[in-house]
Image: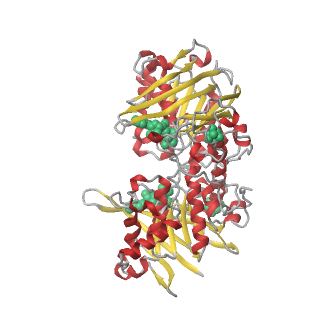
Amino acid sequence: MPPTLMAERAAAPAAGTPILSVRGLKTYFRADDGVVRAVDGVSFDVRAGRTLGIVGESGCGKSITARSILGIVDRPGKIEAGEVWLTPGGGTGAPIDLAKLASDSAEMRAIRGKEIALVFQEPMSSFSHYYTVGNQIMEAIRLHSDATKQQAHARAVELLRLVGVPKPERRVDEYPFQLSGGLRQRVMIAMALACDPHVLIADEPTTALDVTTQAQILDLMRELQAKRALALILITHDMGVIAEMADDVVVMYLGRVVERGPVDAIFHDPKHPYTQALLRSIPSIMATPRTKLATISGSIPHPLNRPTGCPFHPRCPDFKPGVCDKAEPATTVIDDRREVACFLYGGGA
Amino acid sequence: MNVLEVVNLRKYFPIRKGLLRRIAGQVRAVDGVSFHIKKGETLALVGESGCGKTTVSRCILRALPPSEGEIRFAVDGKVVDLAKLPKRALRPYRRHIQMVFQDPFSSLNPRMVIADIIGEPLLINGMRSGEERRKRVKELLDMVQLPAAYMNRFPHAFSGGQRQRVGIARALALHPSLIVADEPVSALDVSVQAQILNLLLDLQDRLGLTYLFVAHDLSVVKHVSDRVAVMYVGRMVEIAGTADIFARPRHPYTEALLSAVPKPDPRLKSERIILERDVADPANPPPGCHFHPRCRYAVERCKVDTPALQEVEPNRWVSCHRAHELMLRGVQ
Ligand SMILES: Nc1ncnc2c1ncn2[C@@H]1O[C@H](COP(=O)(O)OP(=O)(O)OP(=O)(O)O)[C@@H](O)[C@H]1O
Ligand SMILES: Nc1ncnc2c1ncn2[C@@H]1O[C@H](COP(=O)(O)OP(=O)(O)OP(=O)(O)O)[C@@H](O)[C@H]1O
Ligand code: SF4
Ligand code: SF4
Ligand SMILES: [Mg+2]
Ligand SMILES: [Mg+2]
């Protein structure tokens, strides 16, 4: 049994210790009507006690990136290239390339839940309707430890208390459909924390929630992160949530990382034309009432109709004909935390 | 001039239990709501999931019969109470209030081409000539900035933003005086959301439209509305001008709601007010002020007395016993 979760992790890795490094990850869906390059060359690092935010609009590949890391991409999706280096035990073990492991291998199963846990985008579809909340958490605990039923039950109650579920002794015997959206998301987080993972991937954990409930959940994640030195990957399309939570940010568009950098740089010195346009087009509660928003022309292309060259070129205000539509810009490294994929900054042109 | 005046509107849904489907209780989805909308303005109706926003909209459209209250609508130089009119008598007024829906994917008939989707209300309201209809459809497509060449396409060939434009064109077909838009941009991608919000602002300027804009996203609301009405568990808690309510909320729930909105700037250290527990259940709301179990300013009186919506300063309505003494925090 891992030690109690209320306490700080005794041998917590120092904040900033690299835990997970993704390099050149490509995950494609090949079908009769074409290839969807859902993830097309994604690189980033995730560190203990830090939050990496992945942001981008619908279909840009955020969820498939998460699923690729855990080896749970649905068919016909397949990792085509790249590496996913995990240093287990919170940065103490020997690094393993998860991209090389078969998704149903014993090694991969030992990593899922115990080293890296995932909070899904749709809480309702990731619960079973037929088992109580407690049974589902207990199952997760017993998968990775030799805890007895009683121990697992006690721990399930403790986990529910930890994530702020009121009257956990009673709630543990309820079914997911009996809970409100906010409580359900707390239970999801409790389940993800059941085996005390070092990396937590939260895929749109608050998108379905109201703002006041979202505030509760974000607060909870921050608190847990501090206590457990969790390396957090937070996936969202909400720039506000990214600004509040992330240390580093990955901006994706059509499967590509267009820009990566520290949160302050992304918001105050964005380099890529897409990041710049996205930031201008988000409505802000700080805006003057009834002001028009800057817009990005056009809409996101269908994944099977991917533009040639730079995927953003049909919508880009800085588009250079004959350059941007001819080749894909390579990633220009600015420093070890900052990179951008655009011909304005090199990109191989 | 007020286009719409809603007075003490209530809508209760029965909760049925058991084999005999006996009424075991009531969901007080809308529980005594009053507000008005002036000609040419946008009133935003905001609040969290389940607070009754959609139910208010559907009552105004008479898609639902109200349980109680008045819905005074100014039309053709007179005022009618839509709440009291029998279904048949409503017909001449329906065309004046149109709806824009949240989901541009399910709200358009997939078996109809765009020209027929937009032309249908014209046909129903007596525009027989196909020639005339096409002319009007062209005009409407132009208004929502879609090429006339799209007329013969089916909705599946359109992106979410384009479908929402079609929905808006259809709503505009009969020159309505009031448009009720229920979460018109919440299903759209950020970059497309901005296009649709701008379009709605443009159309309002050009055509003098009046909007009831239902939304849960306060950042969006700030960009489109002239005034904001905040609901909590079926009741109105505050109504005020947009700049005023954001700068200085007068109701504790409004304050908490504003503080919870993530601000897109990492340099702003937000001091969020974390509300404890969940939103109250409208089938079993707490007595007194519905917000009292979560309110950090609550006093004994709040547990028993229901605060009335009162005009605490000109054009500013608040339902809180302590509205006059509290100094609450807004955003900028
Ligand atoms: N099972 C699948 N078969 C084919 N294509 C898929 C499949 N799952 C995802 N895709 C495609 O992969 C791309 C990336 O999808 P992904 O779910 O990662 O997007 P996302 O960024 O998470 O979007 P959202 O914000 O809508 O959740 C999309 O174009 C999507 O259509
Ligand atoms: N037909 C119905 N029968 C019973 N209860 C209903 C019905 N329609 C709505 N309700 C209940 O009335 C309350 C208000 O619902 P409504 O849809 O108006 O909320 P809303 O503010 O629009 O929420 P959201 O932001 O989630 O759209 C909720 O508790 C809802 O469950
Ligand atoms: S590569 Fe060209 S089209 Fe792409 S973002 Fe840069 S300037 Fe724009
Ligand atoms: S009436 Fe009382 S409980 Fe309700 S908002 Fe005002 S102070 Fe809070
Ligand atoms: Mg996703
Ligand atoms: Mg609604």
Left or right of residue B294: residue A76: left
In the rendered picture of this protein, how many numbered marks are placed on residues? 0
The x and y percentages for residue A140 are 44, 26
Quadrant of the rendering where the C terminus of chain B is positioned: bottom right
Left or right of residue A190: residue A290: right
Left or right of residue A344: residue A66: left
The x and y percentages for residue A162 are 56, 34
The x and y percentages for residue A256 are 56, 34
Q: Identify which residue, B313 or A291, lies in the foreground.
A: A291
Q: Is residue B278 above or below residue B86?
A: above
Q: Identify which residue, B25 or B197, lies in the foreground.
A: B197
The x and y percentages for residue A248 are 66, 33
Quadrant of the rendering where the N terminus of chain B is positioned: bottom right
Farthest front residue? Answer: A322
Q: Is residue A24 above or below residue B143?
A: above
Farthest top residue? Answer: A94
Does the rendering let one see residue B215? yes
Which residue is pictured at 64% across the width and 42% down the height? A320
Farthest left residue? Answer: B19
